[in-house]
Structures are given as C-alpha cells and as structure tokens.
C-alpha cells in the first residue's frame, strides 16, 4: 500500500477547510423553514415568530414558521429528524421532547442523537390557572375542592407526555389528590376550554394565558418555578404554597437534524444569539413573561442531557407511559 505523501494530505485538509468555509459563507441561499410542533397561538408560536421576524433580516433570507402539531410535539420533531441535514429545516424544540424520550415507548428518533442543538431560545414559567368564575382563590382552596369533589377535577395539558402533563401528575401526588388529565394539541384549544369551563385548571406556560389573566378571565394561583415571575410578581410559587422543592419551567430552543455541517450550526447560533440578546427581542419576551437565554450549542446539548435524565425519573415516579 503506497504511503500517503504529507503534501497530498495537507492539500486534502486545505481543500476540506476551504469547502467548509465556502458552505458557511454561502448559507443560507434559500428560505429556511422553522417547524413548530404545536398549533398557532401558544408560547412556541409566539417565540418562533419573535425570533424569525429579526432572523430573516439578519440572514437575508425568509425564515418561515410551519406548524406541525400532534402527539405531544413528537410529530413535528420526527419530521425534522428525517429532513436533509443542510440547515434549511429546523425544529423549535422544547423540554417536552426531553420528556418524550422516557414516556413514549416508540419514537422514530432519539432526541439526543437525531438533532444538532443550536441555541436555547427562552425559558417560560408555567403557571397554575383556573377560571376566574371559580370561588377558589389559592392553592390550598383548590386542593380542598379537589378532595371534596364528587368527580375528579380535570386539568388540561398541551398533550400526553408534555411538561404540563407531568407537572399536573406531580402536583396531584404532592398534594395527595387525584386529578383527571385531559390532553390537547396545544395552548390555544386548551385555553378555550379552560375559559369555557370544560376543564378546571391548567399548568400551561405563562405566555398564552397572560392576556386572560390581565383581563380578569383567568385567575393565577401559583407559578411552578422556584422563583416568582417578574410578569406576575404577586403570584406565589408552588413551593411558597406548600409544595416544597417544586421547580418546573418550560424551555424552548432551536435544533437542526443531526449531521448538519458544524459551520452552518455555528452561523445559525451566532445570528440567533444576536437576535435573542437584542433589546427588541428582550422587550417582546418581557411582554409575554419569557426569559431570553441565547446560549451555545454545547450548553443546550448539556441541558437536553440533564433534562432527559431528570424527566426519566419523574415520568417513572408518575407512571406516565404512552404506547
């Protein structure tokens, strides 16, 4: 076997680097699609559009938001996992996808292996809300009502295996009550039924319910994060309400299919982080109760790994399994 000549090796490496650089410099050359795995109207849709409005300008190409809801956000994720890894099809992922790894028996993708994380977009607190027509005014009163109810009180979520689902099971277990879980395809239909009285409560993200809280149609009882929300500073945490150690929140982030060139991922990260840290984006997040993040791809990957382990334990304790 002939020896590889040093000069030939150097030329090959140089050509490879030149090709990668050209790829980054030429990207994007056409519109990018950001798949949102929930229906329009929820936190994911609001955050996606806040990002893409500015990202389209900075990249010089349209970034199109496409909704592909269903199956606890796993249908949209499966679509992106199977897409060509060229940076033109992206996923608005969420903590729900880290949970799905444990609760779904069969997934056509591996959330840690099938995607290339780009950056975490924002963290949105979840909030326990009820219809304002209810006489209940605090968590203690809600728990008492649940214990006295002839039938189980129903809570809605964004789908089986989502964070809202697990938050509800954890809340019920820690409160010593039983609740009926009603899954929806997203925040918009869930909020409609909550306003209509079809479900008694929800643990949805803050974004879709803030307008109804401000208008007096929904009553917030507690936020699920360890710290109070700056958007609802007078609303206590569940820990303050007596559920010690309760700390859950929903993060949203952008991912590409695994195998997407690293230079493309790096360019997308750089441009997205600029948008996320911009004054305009921060203001839009403050208006909807979200905390902008904008971290590195490596930091997002570590977050996914940590949450996958965390929710594997919680889903096992809650006995949440989906065929």
Image (cartoon, rainbow, N blue to C red):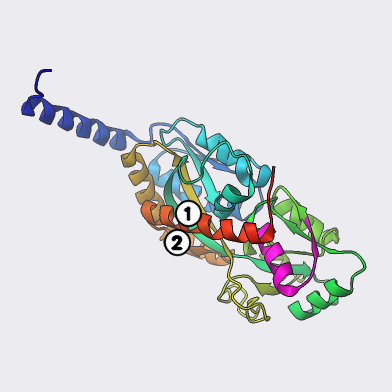
Please identify the quarter of the rendering in which residue 210 is found.
Answer: bottom right
Q: Which residue is mark 2?
A: 293
The magenta stretch is: 163-181
Residue 130 coordinates in the image, percent (x, y) = 78, 68
Q: Residues within 10 Å of mark 1 (few under 14, many from 20)?
A: many
Residue 151 coordinates in the image, percent (x, y) = 90, 64
Residue 175 coordinates in the image, percent (x, y) = 73, 74
Q: What SS does tag 1 mark?
A: helix
Q: Which residue is mark 1?
A: 304
Residue 31 is left or right of residue 182, and the answer is left
**Which residue in the rendered view is the most extreme toward the top?**
1
Residue 276 is left or right of residue 71, and the answer is left
**Quadrant assignment for the C terminus:** top right
**Quadrant assignment for the N terminus:** top left
Residue 166 coordinates in the image, percent (x, y) = 66, 60
**Residue 39 visible in rendering:** no
Q: Nearer the viewer, residue 83 or 88?
A: 83
Seen at 46% across and 54% down, the residue is 305
How far apart in space, not on screen, are marks 2 and 1 (Cα)?
A: 14 Å
**Residue 143 visible in rendering:** yes
């Amino acid at each position: 076997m002939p020896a590889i000549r040093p000069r030939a090796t150097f030329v090959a490496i140089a050509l490879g680097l030149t090709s990668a650089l050209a790829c980054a410099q030429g990207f994007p050359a056409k519109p990018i699609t950001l798949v949102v795995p929930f229906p329009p109207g929820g936190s994911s849709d609001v955050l996606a559009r806040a990002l893409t409005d500015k990202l389209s300008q900075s990249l010089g190409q349209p970034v199109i938001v496409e909704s592909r809801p269903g199956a606890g956000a796993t249908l949209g994720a499966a679509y992106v996992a199977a897409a060509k890894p060229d940076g033109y099809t992206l996923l608005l992922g969420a903590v729900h996808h880290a949970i799905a790894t444990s609760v779904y028996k069969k997934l056509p993708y591996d959330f840690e292996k099938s995607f290339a994380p780009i950056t975490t977009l924002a963290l949105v607190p979840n909030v326990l809300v009820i219809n304002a027509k209810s006489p209940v005014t605090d968590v203690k009163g809600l728990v008492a009502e649940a214990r006295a109810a002839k039938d189980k009180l129903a809570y809605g979520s964004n789908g089986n295996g989502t964070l809202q689902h697990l938050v509800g099971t954890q809340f019920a277990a820690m409160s010593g009550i039983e609740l009926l879980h009603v899954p929806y395809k997203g925040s918009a239909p869930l909020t409609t039924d909550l306003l209509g009285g079809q479900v008694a409560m929800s643990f949805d993200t803050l974004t879709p319910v803030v307008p109804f809280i401000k208008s007096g149609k929904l009553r917030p009882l507690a936020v699920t994060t360890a710290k109070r929300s700056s958007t609802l500073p007078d609303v206590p945490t569940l820990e303050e309400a007596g559920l010690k150690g309760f700390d859950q929140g929903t993060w949203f982030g952008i991912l590409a299919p695994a195998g997407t060139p690293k230079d493309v991922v790096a360019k997308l990260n750089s441009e997205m982080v600029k948008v996320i840290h911009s004054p305009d984006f921060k203001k839009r997040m403050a208006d909807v109760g979200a905390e902008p993040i904008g971290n590195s791809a490596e930091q997002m990957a570590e977050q996914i790994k940590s949450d996958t382990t965390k929710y594997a334990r919680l889903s096992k304790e809650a006995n949440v399994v989906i065929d």
